[in-house]
Amino acid sequence: MSSVGDNWSSRKNLSDDLEKLSPEKGFELFTKVWPTLETDRQKRGLLRTFSHGKHQYLVDVLDFGITDPSTEVQTTALILLKYHTLIDFTEDFEAYAEWRNKTMGMTLDEVVDVTLTNKFEEAYQNSKTLEVLLESASRPPLKSHVSADKALSLCEYAIQNGTPEAV
């Protein structure tokens, strides 16, 4: 695992191997390997590996990168977090710390669920259309995390509160 860097092929192979492990075992392995990594390239490669597989402990994995002393590693982790959750903390690290306290212990699916709900309610309050909200939920990578139940609950929210007018 520590030899993974910018080589996409080795990251893909490792990602496939990680998917065969339980999420708990994969994260345990990550926490043992991370302190042994000597270069930013290795750390960024390992973060990308876990990101590729949409590992359920990805938010915890990315936290290692976001709190790393290297700005290159932090930037990679923040970009990956934004890709998977649509939340951009690249300009506001204090907001990340507050958000992280609220999401501590959540799986990637749970974080996406909470994020999507919050974004939906915020957009709804700002009078954006339901179509725009549901369209954003159907784009990758959220598409792979949004269940039919979640989409239905978002629709029910809109029905209960009335459909907002388009801006």
Image (tube, helix red, strand yellow):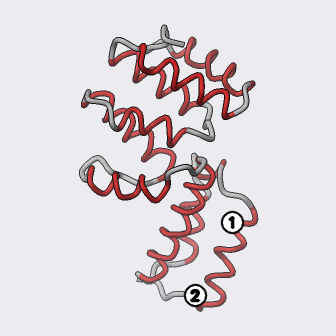
The N terminus: image quadrant: top right
Q: Is residue 20 above or below residue 117?
A: above
Q: Position of residue 18 (x, y in %)?
A: 66, 24
Q: Nearer the viewer, residue 132 or 33?
A: 33
**Mark 2 — residue?**
163
**Mark 1 — residue?**
150
The C terminus: image quadrant: bottom left
Cβ atoms under marks 2 and 1 closer than 8 Å: no
Q: Position of residue 124 (x, y in %)?
A: 49, 80
Q: Write the residue at 51% across / 87% down.
A: 164
Q: Write the residue at 65% across / 90% down.
A: 160
Q: Secondary structure at mark 2?
A: loop
Estimate how packed mark 2 is, as few (under 14), some (14 to 19) or many (20 or more) residues with alpha carbons within 10 Å: some
Q: Write the residue at 40% across / 21% down.
A: 43
Q: Nearer the viewer, residue 38 or 145?
A: 38
Left-right relation of 164 to 39: right
Q: Earlier in the sequence, mark 2 or mark 1?
A: 1
- Quarter of the figure with residue 10: top right
Q: Write the residue at 59% across / 52% down.
A: 142
Q: Secondary structure at mark 1?
A: helix
Q: Is residue 143 above or below residue 126?
A: above
- Quarter of the figure with residue 71: top left
Left-right relation of 40 to 140: left
Instruction: Count numbered badges in the picture.
Output: 2
